[in-house]
Image (spheres, rainbow, N blue to C red):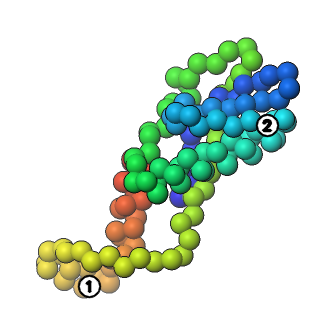
Amino acid sequence: MNFIYPCIIHCEEDGYWSEFVDFEGCFSEGDTLDEILSNSKEALQSIILYNIEKGKDLPVSTPIKEIAEDENSFKTYIDCKISGGTKLVKKTLSIPEWVNNIGIERQLNFSKILTDAIIKEIKNI
């Protein structure tokens, strides 16, 4: 899954620090612009994984136009990919028999459909 959130990069005399307005307490720092962008991506990935593992809803990404900046900062988008690995977990669930029959007729992949629906819910789409 790919996630994109706005980030504010603050420029200081001895380097940079960043913050994500959608994740309270999510900060990073770096000596160079390349380093702060890389570290910010890592911070975003960590907080998203933490929220997913704890079963928390992910916030909706704030439109970048709504974020204030000053003369010593700039705003940008940071993206990161979260890959959940290949380990599968077996789940038992119940669906109406008629839905099951039509799904089998149409050769639907029930696991893929459920996985896609859960990912959509996680992303708050």
Q: Is residue 29 left or right of residue 100?
A: right
Vertical order, 115 against 52 (above or below): below
Check disc 1 and report the residue beneath it.
Answer: 104
Instruction: Tell me which residue sits at (41%, 76%) in the image.
Output: 89
Q: Is any part of residue 122 visible from this angle?
A: no
Quarter occupied by residue 7: top right
What's the CA distance linking mark 2 and mark 1?
Answer: 54 Å
Dots 2, 1 in contact, CB < 8 A: no
Residue type at numbered disc 2: Gly
Instruction: Tell me which residue sits at (18%, 74%) in the image.
Output: 95
Q: Residues within 10 Å of mark 1 (few under 14, many from 20)?
A: few
Vertical order, 61 against 122 (above or below): above
Quarter occupied by residue 60: top left
Residue type at numbered disc 1: Ile
Q: Where in the figure is residue 81, as x and y percent of width and height?
A: 60, 56
Check disc 2 and report the residue beneath it.
Answer: 30
Q: Where in the figure is residue 65, as x and y percent of width and height?
A: 55, 24
Number of marks in picture: 2
Q: Where in the figure is residue 3, as x and y percent of width and height?
A: 55, 49
Q: Residues within 10 Å of mark 2 (few under 14, many from 20)?
A: some
| Disc on res. 34 | none
Q: Where in the figure is residue 43, as x and y percent of width and height?
A: 64, 45
Element under disc 1: helix
Element under disc 2: strand
Instruction: Tell me which residue sits at (40%, 73%) in the image.
Output: 112
Vertical order, 58 against 32 (above or below): below
Instruction: Tell me which residue sits at (32%, 76%) in the image.
Output: 91
Sequence-wise first label, 2 or 1: 2
Mark in the foreground, 2 or 1: 2
Q: Is any part of residue 54 visible from this angle?
A: yes
